[in-house]
Image (cartoon, coloured by chain):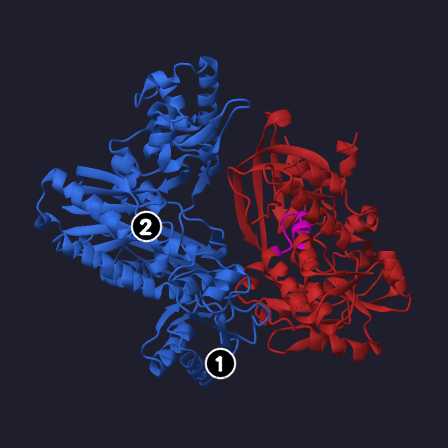
Chain colours: A blue, B red
Amino acid sequence: MRIGVDVGGTNTDAVLMDGTTVIGWFKTQTTADVTTGITTAIRTVLEETKIPTNEIKAVMIGTTHFTNAVVEQKRLMQTAAIRVGLPATECLPPMVDWPPDLRDTIGNHKYLVHGGHEFDGREIAPLDENEIREVAKDIKSKGIRAVAISAVFSPVNGSFEERAAEIIQNELPDVSISLSHEIGRMGILERENAAILNACLGELAKAIVDSFRKALADMKIDAPFYLSQNDGTLMSAEYAEKYPVLTFASGPTNSMRGAAFLSGVKDAMVVDLGGTTSDVGMLLRGFPREASVAVEISGVRTNFRMPDVYSFGLGGGSIVSQDPLKIGPQSVGYELTTKGLVFGGDVLTTTDLAVAGGLVDIGDASAVKSLDATFVREALDEIQSMVETAVDRMKTSAAPVPLILVGGGTILVSRQVEGTSEMIKPEHFPVANAIGAAIAQVGGETDRVFALAELPRDEALAQARQEATDKAIAAGADEKTITIVDVEEVPLAYLPSNAVKIRVKAVGDLAL
Amino acid sequence: MRLLHPENIEDIALGAAVLGTGGGGDPYIGKLMGIQAISEFGPVELLSLDEIDDDALIVPTAMMGAPTVMVEKLPKGDEIIKAFHALESYLGQKITATMSAEAGGLNSVTPLTVAARLRIPMVDCDGMGRAFPELQMVTATLYGISSTPFAIGDEKGNSAILNTINNRWTETFSRSITIDMGCAAMIACYATTGKELKEWAVPNTMTLVEDIGRTIREARESKANVVETVREAVGGFQVFRGKIVDVRRRTEKGFARGEAIMEGVDDYDSQTLELNFQNENLVAIIDGEIMVSVPDLITVLETETGEPITTETLRYGFRVTVLGIPCNEKWRTPEGLELVGPRYFGYDVDWVPVEERYGQ
């Protein structure tokens, strides 16, 4: 049996699963320290289901800890950003476009050194090792313990980042180092930003992983635990300590993965209707489609693998104004159960409309009897139209696709959404996100350039598949269950050697 | 004369994306470079054309290369400085000012980085009034101005000066050098006197892009209809409003080519628009007929936000409004149309001015 936990902005959900069966679940409010909420949720599920802790084989946690730490600028480390690229890139140094307060919080320590590659693999300049040793001295004198290293065209050739890391680690054995090519993609500012964010979260990551470890030990759960990544796969606790940034936006990913699992549909649109906002995304072969443009995190542009999600201001707690009709984006949020009309409050919310329109029976229906029937119908039409617009915006073709609705706000939608072939509200829809965490697999990815002049395309593809598979096994996947879920070939047309960038992603079930 | 400060650059970069007609490179990098250069070296003087002496020497500067490379190998910032000085000694005259060759996209801002470093002014004009993919496609070519002596420089300190028999040859050679320089280089060309410039330049385009950018920003702040205010600011026409339902892309000879298909809404219900692009938007075909074509500008704005959409970001589901904007009159001559008209890009049709179809 396994436990999935999703820590959201408002709620912390835990779900207990036996294979593919949901045994029980519990929803509680997210606590300021996060761990208390997780403990409450897990403890309650175990008590309600009377499952002994020794039956638990794994715990999967999806958390917003690290995103919040960046947003609130709490517990971030002083970080040295080293970029290998001179003489190129000098005019835009690391963190040039960051919000000044966040940049100051982590010290604005930046170093530019010689090296880097051209688009076709030639060197811009040789790596100057003495220069890097000088940087190491400076880092030491400032007492900095987190380092992010980026190099021009490192996604094509990561050797300069790796060599620079070796030199730094040799001089400073205690610093933790993040390499941009292990985290982000093409586009140096965005990739470097992701690496710097990862580096500055290093200490927090160790502390959080420790506190999870301790919380589970206190509950007498002696099982390995994993953290959800934003691509829908898991990372081990040890890996999470090194790459905390990969948890960013794992929440919407877990919802969509949970929706796919609960409905059995692998290609669909998913709407996760929350209390204040809703997220729309698209499932492709059971995984969320990834964003192809820069994604901002607290004002910092990044380009690592994030789910392509469109958020809009509609949820079960959205405030409704009558004249003129307006729904959201203001919301009563987690106070719905005290402020909504049907719960004895005095704020008209979307949930009240759903009760008045007979879509759902919760709270005190007599509290919304006085609402004008025409108004209720028009307002519900408006809600329907908001969902339809958002869904259509995220579709990639005009062909109708299935729509899966999950999350607590699912009650707001009663009719089939235009442009969809069917509407699915799966069982356990309120905790799809925790289920998404519980059923997550482990994955491996390769993303690099192959010169087809030297290697036939078939062999290049086979090699890329093998690399991805090997990485998945190294990450803990059961070899027998591994499948290739994504193959992307991008011809680099301006290159003479017929180069192609191949990205392959393999996933498999966790070997337990 | 007025001074350009970092806050002006934000508006210029945003407005330049409108005149970029879908191409012209990543305005984000351009904006950062401009702001960084001004913060480091001080504000840049912007002179209007009538403030330029007839015997002044003006040299436009620009970046050349693949936009996809420029977001990875960022410039050093002084790539062109040495070549610029070499050009001065070659011409035997001090360069008075620089200017933008291309007001649309990234290259509206790149000359600022040169002007800031060399502490020379920039002239309020450009050579296109929009963005075009090739080097010879500037109004200077129409007036017999040579692109050479042509200077090109990279971040390593390499530079070259070219002399060619015509501006298309400059395009050919400089493209090869750019690839060897790592697909991103800085160029200086079309050296011209003040007297000549007043004839061939598209005037006031820096002020125009800044006005467009400010209009968008202010319309957003006051929650006004951004698309309509942009249309008024550029003197353009609404050609279509709809939703992107398909995008096809391919790479041909180093250019990003493709088509986006849009289905109409509101007044355009049941109409279909096919947008063809080669880095920049080339033609808008409505229900099988070319309704707007180069050299007139075709700009796609997101209907809700008024954000200009580049050809790389065109994608299914975007709600968009297509504007047709009359190009500068210099392009509307037989020579202009031969250089950048629909036939040059492979469309066997006569150019029809956008206002003839939409202006009533």
Viewer-nearest residue: A482 or A341: A341
Q: Is residue B10 above or below residue A238?
A: above
Residue A460 is a magenta residue: no
Disc 1 and disc 2 on one polypeptide chain: yes
Crowding at dot 2, Cα within 10 Å, few <14 / some 14-19 / many 20+, comes out as few
Relative image position of residue A137 (x, y in whole percent): 43, 83
Q: Is residue B228 above or below residue A365?
A: below
Element at label 1: loop
Distance Cα–Cα, label 1 vs label 2: 49 Å
Instruction: Determine which residue is flagged by label 1.
Output: A126
Can I make out residue A428 in this image? yes
- Subunit of label 1: A
> Residue, x 10% and y 49% (percent of image)?
A53
Residue B18 is a magenta residue: yes
Relative image position of residue A329 (x, y in whole percent): 48, 35
Relative image position of residue A364 (x, y in whole percent): 31, 20
Relative image position of residue B246 (x, y in whole percent): 52, 38
Q: Amino acid at mark 1?
A: Pro
Viewer-nearest residue: B298 or B332: B298
Viewer-nearest residue: A45 or B22: A45
Instruction: Determine which residue is flagged by label 2.
Output: A32
Q: Which residues are magenta?
A: B13-27
Element at label 2: loop
Crowding at dot 1, Cα within 10 Å, few <14 / some 14-19 / many 20+, comes out as some
